[in-house]
Image: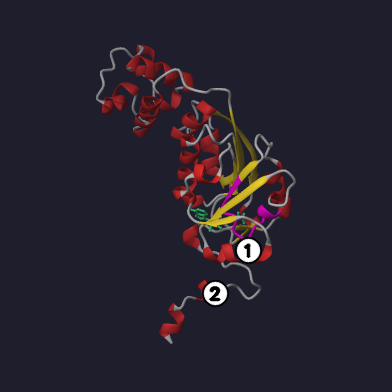
Amino acid sequence: MEHTRTHSPSRRPAADGSVRAKKALGQHFLTDESIALRIVDALTGLTPHVLEIGPGMGVLTKYLYSKEGIDFHAIEIDHESVDYLHAHYPGLHVIEGDFLALDPSALFAQPFAVIGNFPYNISSQILFKVFDNRNRVPEVVGMFQKEVAERVAAQPGSKTYGILSVLLSAFYDIEYLFTVHEHVFNPPPKVKSAVIRLRRNAVTALECDENLFVRVVKTGFNQRRKTLRNALRQLDTPLDAVPERFLSLRAEQLSVSDFITITQSLS
Ligand code: SAH
């Protein structure tokens, strides 16, 4: 009957008790334990407080939550996964909720590291949230779709260099660790994945108005084919004080310190 059909079979746990992957939640479960271990081992321990985003069935979690000397929490949006985690990892503290809506200060009084095989549909939003919390997040280890990982780790002059590359590299040392093939996931994603690590650098504050810096970077890349002279018109601020050598360049050609110089000249 139609009625029983719409009572979606995908809502029921699979026969073996595992969680059925839900596409809308970006669920692709990692099935390769050696890769899970490499990811967990990539955390350098800058802080004992650790938050995992999207543990799913716990392929990373099981190596993390019982570690000596670690204060571990996880946040997972999927009710079925949360049930699974409670059943399989007694004592694990997992919050059922949306990481993007989480107030991290309610969870951690201390700086905390972020780890995960992240839901790819919200990769950029996770990274912008890390940027906003840069003074509370000393380290991030995570798997993203390869293209996003490359974008974050990109250097000036490369085609993939963009807003997140500049904003994050202003405050983090970024390493592209390794590429992961789609066949180690269930179900396999359409794209390759990659693991990156971000570690907070020594910069406490940029030598410019940081809010304006963010606006300049975003506006510059908003029309990335245009020279800065044209792209930055949108700021509605006179560009007279901006050094001439930058105005004929495009955002993708500029380093973090170039953007800082430009921001200084605008204030
Ligand atoms: N880490 C697991 C699962 C990866 S799939 C593994 O490697 O196998 C991504 C996970 O993120 C899923 O479990 C999904 O339910 C969860 N997720 C998706 N959106 C989320 C959000 N906004 N907040 C927290 N978790 C989320």
Taking depth in this image into account, of 129 and 148 the one nearest to the observer is 129
Q: SS class of the residue under badge 2?
A: loop
Q: Secondary structure at mark 1?
A: helix
Q: Is residue 122 left or right of residue 212?
A: right
Q: Amino acid at mark 1?
A: His
Instruction: Mark 1 or mark 2: name the one nearer the start of the chain.
Output: 2
Give the side of residue 106 with respect to residue 88, left or right.
left
Based on the picture, tell me whether residue 157 belongs to the magenta stretch. no
Name the amino acid type tagged 2.
Answer: Arg
Residue sitting nearer the eye, 251 or 204: 204
- Number of numbered markers: 2
The quarter of the image that holds ligand 1 is bottom right
Q: Mark 2, residues whose alpha carbon is within 10 Å: few (<14), some, or many (≥20)?
A: few
Picture quadrant of residue 95: bottom right
What residue did someone put label 1 on?
A: 86
Q: Name the residue tied to disc 2.
A: 12
Judge whether residue 61 is colored magenta. Answer: yes
